[in-house]
Amino acid sequence: MIMEELSPVDKFYIWLEEDKAQQEADALLPKKKRRGRKPSKKMYFTPTTDQAIHAYNLEEQYSKRNRLYRDHIHYAFDKLAENIIHTFKFYYFDVPYNDVKAEVVAFLNEKIHKYNLEKGKAFSYFSIVAKNYLIIANNANYAKMKQKADIVVIDDNRNLGAEQVYSDYQETLRDFTDLFVEYYTDNMNKIFTNKRDIIVADTLIELFRIRANIENFNKKALYILIRERTGLKTQNITKVVNIMKRQYEKMYRTFNDRGIIGNHIL
């Protein structure tokens, strides 16, 4: 059977055998002394993992995909989830640790089809995916934990009028932000011409879209998330943030006076 007739997974296992044979041959050669410290841990994401994920995404037969995932992908995802959780101390969850890890692995599976072998190592890509997922989930659960705290004193002197005003303000702000997102989506390439700035602005607008899940984020966590998504430095992000902040405040004042933002009228 010629290689063209083999499925992507079949080709992967042939490549794997050839790679093992090559490694065994290389092991017989005199070893060159390497500078620096020896690796202290066995790597769980390797070039084999990258090739396995690539073959998995190309394969159409579920039985072959399942075998490949079981043999060469699942352990890497499981170990990655474990290390990300402990390294960054994502511990604000009201479910057992094993359930949290399983959720992360499941999310990595949802995103596995987006990995492109030509754009870099799988470890880098899936580390970012796992970290971003945990940042959102961790902060959301932390907020819930604060809301569920025992109420020791019931305030009988509530200012219901002030509460209603605040509620109306929040509703107006939500309406404005929805229109702000629409406006920026339509005009982003006019407001920013630098490709790097457009990437940051697009990421910020996406955060506005999913703000219901991240409204309790602190500034530091948001900057980490944006840096991970864009790959840019803080100063590049801050420049765009400041421009959008000024526009947001100016347009909000106009919106309050006239109920309009760009071509959108409330």
Image (tube, rainbow, N blue to C red):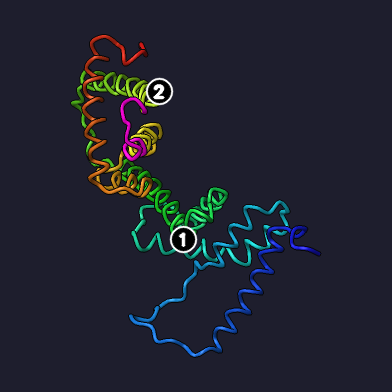
Residue 249 lies, in percent from the top left, at 22, 24
- Left/right placement of residue 100 relative to residue 165 reads right
Give the crowd class for mark 2: few <14, some 14-19, many >=20 residues within 10 Å. Answer: few
Magenta stretch in the rendered image: 189-199
Q: Earlier in the sequence, mark 2 or mark 1?
A: 1
Classify the position of the N terminus by image quarter. Answer: bottom right
Where is mark 1, residue-wise? 123
Q: Give me the residue at 25% from left, 47% from top.
A: 234
In the image, 54 versus 111, the foreground residue is: 54
Q: Nearer the viewer, residue 92 or 6?
A: 6
Question: For numbered disc 2, what is the local secondary structure?
Answer: helix
Label number found at residue 186: 2
- In the rendering, at what x and y percent does residue 262 appear? 33, 15
Q: What percent of the width, then of the height, locates residue 159?
A: 20, 22
Q: Nearer the viewer, mark 2 or mark 1?
A: 2
**Residue at image point 62% right, 61% down:** 69
The dominant secondary structure in magenta is helix
Amino acid at pointer 1: Phe
The reply to whether the magenta stretch includes residue 178 is no
